[in-house]
Image (spheres, rainbow, N blue to C red):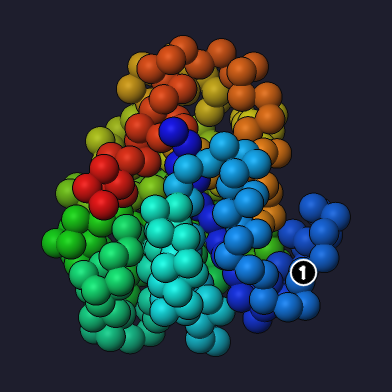
Amino acid sequence: MIVDAWMQHGTVRFLNHGMLDSLWRWTGQKPPEEQPPVSATVAAMDAGGVDVGLISAWYGPEGDLVSNDEVASFAAEAPGRLRGIASVDLRKPMEAVRELRRCVTELGFAGLRVVPWLWELPPTDRRYYPLFAACVELGVPFCTQVGHTGPLRPSETGRPIPYIDQVALDFPELVIVGGHIGYPWTEEMVAVCRKHPNVYIDTSAYTVRRYPPELVRYMTQDRHHKVMFGTNFPMITPERALRGLDDLGLDDVRREAFLSGNAVRVFALDRS
């Protein structure tokens, strides 16, 4: 079994947003002019052997780019294959908490994702804290981005230290998933992951052959590493992201944890 911890089934307004121009340029692709069908995302998952994909809503200061209800509708087209990850408006904390509760209890979403660079607010900002408490109460993880930003936005908000470290100290019960590896601060992200039992890493936005050596050492040397597979689809397809997996040297236990075990546990997919 393979779980993709960070995907998007994007809307046209999201995929054509100017902030993503640099990503399309790097990948040599062009954003679609029409809404992509859910069947295309599932076909890409099939080509890479991915069984379950966690697709994220996107919300920023200008409003929703992929709404929670749109994500729910996409997931409904591929039951058992796609699960929603919520996003919310940080500027309205109580509305954000209510929306998160609705997404988890009514729409069946498996977590919350807030992308700090989109707001230019690190996760230690007071506006996140009611959401952290709600995540703990609802039993879902807080997913975020760590490392530099590919889009043309400042990168400071993606520092694992002090931001993720401080949040984990303030909310030890909160499960945190830091997506995009944390490069160029990957060693910091690994250190925070080792320090805090409820902090995890996902490899979205990176192919296997681009994993930093410090991440590979952690995955191959720690029997109970807390790294999970992710793509950042559609920027990277699962098939491309996983190319060269055997070269990592993971034994069966570590490989299973990476491809599915950690994600199944964190997102409670075995109880879905």
Decide: is 69 above or below 152: below
Residue at (39, 53) in percent of width and height:
80
Residue 79 image offset from top left, x and y in percent: 40, 59
Residue at (43, 15) in percent of width and height:
252
* Of 163 and 242, the residue lying toward us: 242
Q: Horizontally, is 201 left or right of 37 in the view?
A: left
Residue at (39, 28) in percent of width and height:
257
Residue 84 image offset from top left, x and y in percent: 40, 63
Q: Horizontally, is 271 left or right of 235 in the view?
A: left
Residue at (18, 62) in percent of width and height:
138
Question: The residue tagged with tag 1: helix, strand or loop?
Answer: loop
Residue 103 image offset from top left, x and y in percent: 30, 72
Q: Residue 258 occupies which quadrant of the picture?
A: top left
Residue 146 image offset from top left, x and y in percent: 50, 51
Decide: is 261 above or below 39: above
Decide: is 57 above or below 215: below
How many discs appear? Answer: 1
